Image (cartoon, rainbow, N blue to C red):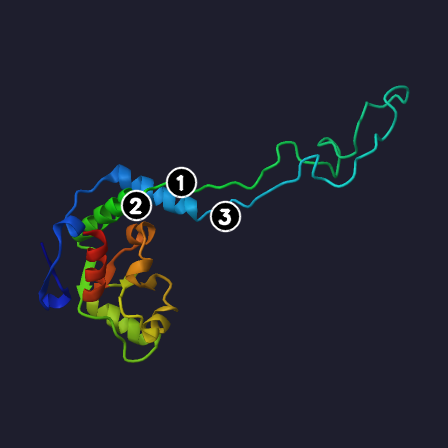
Amino acid sequence: MQLEFAANSGTIEVADRAFAAEFNEGLVHQVVTAYLAGARAGTRAHRNRSAVRGGGAKPWRQKGTGRARAGTIRSPLWRGGGKTFAATPQDHSQKVNRKMYRAAMRAILSELVRQERLVLVKELKVEAPRTKAMVGLLGDLGVEKGLLVTAEADVDLYLAARNLPHVEVLEPSEVNPVNLVGAEKVVMTESAVKQIEEWLA
């Protein structure tokens, strides 16, 4: 299939397998969920009665005091005691194999093309590392906020975009399902498209 560059500046031939795939909503949902789950730290933890310091001795004898029997001052019922159902560190990651991940990426990119949310340009460059220059570049493309994907790591481009809250600059290897799904528009350079096509085709 052919994709058209912005401002009618020509077309580029790309593989149907990568940019004209059917949208599999269930697969995309599973991969996006797994990606977000993998980003969770899962490091929360509480101390149970065995982890709280102290409480080795029985506070008073079992019978004859008139008080409720107690075996440790670190009981969950006591102030300073352990937590009853203590949280433990856990791994939230979900397994997604390479074939599923790539199929989901193909589906997302193809849907971006169908929804006209994918904007192709020959290159992405700014005259100076200034926010004003980036705003002007995006204005020429008709994009207010979105994801910029360029294969040529340009420091000026990163510096010009970093103060814009809804604009992110990534290289093709950094693109992921969450970024693509959440972007209002995705602007890609010709070389970035070729790299992604080579990876997915």
Label 1, on which residue?
94
Q: What is the three-letter code of the residue carrying label 1?
A: Gln
Label 3, on which residue?
41
Q: Quadrant of residue 76?
A: top right
Residue at (42, 44) in percent of width and height = 37
In front: 95, or 92? Answer: 95
Label 2, on which residue?
98
The numbered dot on residue 172 is none
Q: What is the three-letter code of the residue carrying label 2?
A: Arg
Instruction: Estimate the spatial distance between the alpha carbons at disc 2 and disc 1, rounded to whole Å.
Output: 13 Å
Q: Helix, strand or loop at disc 2?
A: helix
Residue at (73, 30) in percent of width and height = 77
Classify mark 1: residues with Cα within 10 Å, few (<14), some (14-19) or many (20+).
Answer: some
Q: Earlier in the sequence, mark 3 or mark 1?
A: 3
Q: Quadrant of residue 121?
A: bottom left
Instruction: Estimate the spatial distance between the alpha carbons at disc 2 and disc 3, rounded to whole Å.
Output: 23 Å
Q: Helix, strand or loop at disc 1?
A: loop
Assess whether mark 3 and mark 2 are in contact (beta carbons under 8 angstroms): no
